[in-house]
Amino acid sequence: MFLNTIVYNETQCDSVKRSISTYRENFMNFNDELEKRVCHDEELKYFYSNITSENIKVSILDKVASDKVLQKRYSTDLLKYFNFYSNILSEETSFLKDNSNLENSINILHSNNDKLQTKLQEIYTQFEKNFSEKSHQNLEFNNIVITLPEGDNNEVNKVDRIDFSNRISLRS
């Protein structure tokens, strides 16, 4: 009955959240360092502003960060991608502080951000496709995630004993 049951431990889920948080922090550090350095060069300032304006819209990163079921299902891939791109941003921030080429750094920011966004979009599309391809004949609960509270330490845990995921699909 439960063909696609996800078994995980809380540390695996927390690892994905930490990786997303670390990536965002490294992205902001690199972005801030670039911003400090381009303020004296009008051409690079214009180029940089065009690159950063792409990041203002709601990105796939926000969708992935908010979807716990997706994080649990693809935790291995997500950890791999976030850790890889986070390390690149961290290293590039160090290089930038050592007065590396600004234009190259801006290109690296743009390129790596696009690559990660593409990878995340592929994962998200595959994840959504799994739910839309199912037949409408038999009702089956897929990807039920149960979170048990640590204890009765607060009002939320006393009221909300079990948190079921919002993913229900139909399967033949």
Image (tube, rainbow, N blue to C red):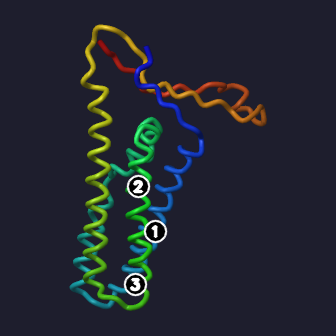
* Residue 123 in the image, given as x and y percentages of width and height: 31, 44
Residue at 52%, 28% (x, y): give it. 145
Report, in whole angstroms, how far the alpha carbon at label 2 lies from the one at label 1: 16 Å
Residue at 30%, 85% (x, y): give it. 102
Q: Of marks 1 and 3, which one's residue comes earlier in the chain?
A: 1
Report, in whole angstroms, how far the alpha carbon at label 3 lies from the one at label 2: 23 Å
Residue at 27%, 39% (x, y): give it. 125
* Residue 168 in the image, given as x and y percentages of width and height: 40, 21
**Does 96 sit left or right of 19 as displayed?**
left
What secondary structure is marked by label 3? helix
Residue nearer the viewer, 168 or 172: 172
Give the residue type at disc 3: Phe
Which quadrant holds the C terminus? top left
Q: Of marks 3 and 2, which one's residue comes earlier in the chain?
A: 2
* Residue 140 in the image, given as x and y percentages of width and height: 40, 14
Give the residue type at disc 2: Lys
Q: Which quarter of the figure has residue 149?
A: top right
The residue where tag 1 is placed is 26
The residue where tag 3 is placed is 95
The residue where tag 2 is placed is 80
Q: Nearer the viewer, mark 2 or mark 1?
A: 2
What secondary structure is marked by label 1? helix
What secondary structure is marked by label 2? helix
